[in-house]
Image (cartoon, rainbow, N blue to C red):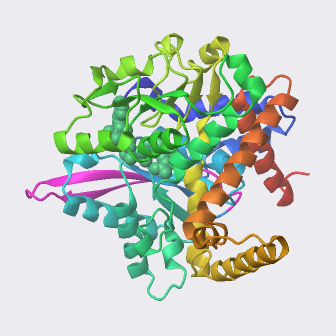
Amino acid sequence: MTAHQDDFFEQVNRYFDEAASLTDYPAGLLAQIRCCNSVYRFDFPLRRTDGRIEVIHGWRVEHSHHKTPVKGGIRYAPDVNESEVMALAALMTYKCAIVDVPYGGGKGGIKIDANLYTVDELERITRRYTHELHKKSFIGPGIDVPAPDYGTGEREMAWIADTYAALNPGQLEALACVTGKPVTQGGVSGRKEATGRGLFFALREACQQADDMMALGLPVGIDGKRIVVQGLGNVGYHAAKFCREGGAVLIAIAEREGAIMNPKGLDEDAVWRHRRDTGSIQNFPGATNLDTRAALELDCDVLIPAALEGVFTEENAARIKAKILLEGANGPTTPEADPIFRQKGMLVIPDIYANAGGVTVSYFEWLKNLSHVRFGRMSKRHEETNERSMLRAIELATGRSFSEEERNQFAKGPDEGDLIASGLEETMVNAYHEIRNMKLKTPQCPDLRIAAFLAAIHKVARSYAELGIFP
Ligand code: NAD
């Protein structure tokens, strides 16, 4: 275990304390917001396919019950530990507050390298983990709602939903016990890509701020911005895809086994297929191989860490040349690296805002599961009919007649995917301005990260005030 993992929770609290020092809330209230309300650690046996018995270590942490259910992903990684899960749960509390999603923060972890287990073993681990959560009431649509994180995805979420439903026969809202499920199993269109798409909206909004771009010496707009991505998993792949489609140029990708670079631009999908077929990101046609660490230090406009925490430390921070750091991963920047980034004048778009697209769309999925109806089902045709009538009225008034192609383009009632993407865009754009304005109106606030923590502290404190815990 490395030093940063040991005290990840303490690191999150250092950011919290810096933001809290800009408020005048009572110390006891701040201590209540900061602490983890419940920490559940448990072990269970797994019989491996070869007959060996192995002990599996699991955690679920509920950081804040100021709003319920609590919400947060489940991570499968070999170095998961209690401090890490507590830190990630705390980040979830602040993240949900920033994007106005009505949950407390939670997080889960299982200490395994998912690559070393068969699909059958992973299924048994996931179902047993769900049993353990259920035994102690650490899962349920109104209690605690997990989601995917590092090392987990739609498949694991489907196993969790199925196990929970089997343990609660007839419970009408059972599917809302977990989000990030496949669409056929109660998921919502656009959840898989939500975190990456949210990162794109965050970056696009940041690049639209003329003052901020001028301070960085960059042109306004995302068009042509040179991007480096670390981690080609769910978050990294989709962030790369949406940013590239939005006009940015993906010049390098770093993975565990090494990195590749092509200043003319890479296609994340072709790279992903190359890695699947050859087992490595390297030796991609037209690209140059380089070391993973060297890729992070390339001259670029935007660096997107989308792997794990603790990537930027006092050791490498000074060598980072990116002007904008868009934090896809949770906790990629240590508190030692942050002052160095501030000194360099970098724009850091912090994790607790930047990667909130996932939980935002998870919230939409939860609402869908509770209402038992697909978004847009009731209104799509109605809107389409209204729009067609409007086009007809324009035709009559102007004498211009629309082609069938134009008619289909202008009069298209939104489907679920359109509504999800638009709800996500609205959320990310509003939240960006909220934290940017918080920074601008708080003279001692050094950067967007502390501004985001400050905005979150105000919202959680307001919740406690409404509960009558403090005046
Ligand atoms: P994932 O498992 O899908 O992908 C992670 C990728 O990082 C993998 O491809 C892995 O090989 C790669 N990786 C691991 N170590 C690396 C290294 N040293 N250098 C380069 N690449 C490395 O996980 P994910 O869901 O994309 O999550 C990534 C990060 O984003 C995590 O910090 C997670 O907490 C955060 N996050 C995820 C979501 C979500 O919706 N999945 C939401 C918010 C935040």
Q: Quadrant of the N terminus?
A: top left
Q: Based on the displayed image, in which of its 4 quarters is residue 335 positioned?
A: top right
Residue 30 appearing in the image? no
Nearest to the observer: residue 463 or residue 384: 384
x, y percent for residue 159: 35, 68
Q: In which quarter of the image is ligand 1?
A: top left
Spot the residue most to the left. Answer: 50
Q: Based on the displayed image, in which of its 4 quarters is residue 401 positioned?
A: bottom right
x, y percent for residue 137: 51, 68
**Residue at image point 39% right, 36% down:** 231
**Residue at image point 87% right, 51% down:** 470
Query: Which SS does the magenta portion mostly show?
Result: strand
Nearest to the observer: residue 276 or residue 318: 276
**Residue at image point 41% right, 32% down:** 230
Image: 53 above or below 384: above
Residue 35 appearing in the image? yes
**Residue at image point 56% right, 71% down:** 141
Nearest to the observer: residue 150 or residue 63: 150
x, y percent for residue 50: 7, 56
Spot the residue most to the bottom. Answer: 170
Image: 155 above or below 57: below
* Tally of numbered discs: 0
- Report the side of 396 relative to 186 (left or right): right
Image: 161 above or below 285: below
x, y percent for residue 56: 28, 52
- Report the side of 48 relative to 82 (left or right): left
Spot the residue most to the front. Answer: 399
Q: Is residue 269 magenta?
A: no
Which range of residues does the magenta coloring cover? Answer: 38-67
Nearest to the observer: residue 395 or residue 260: 395
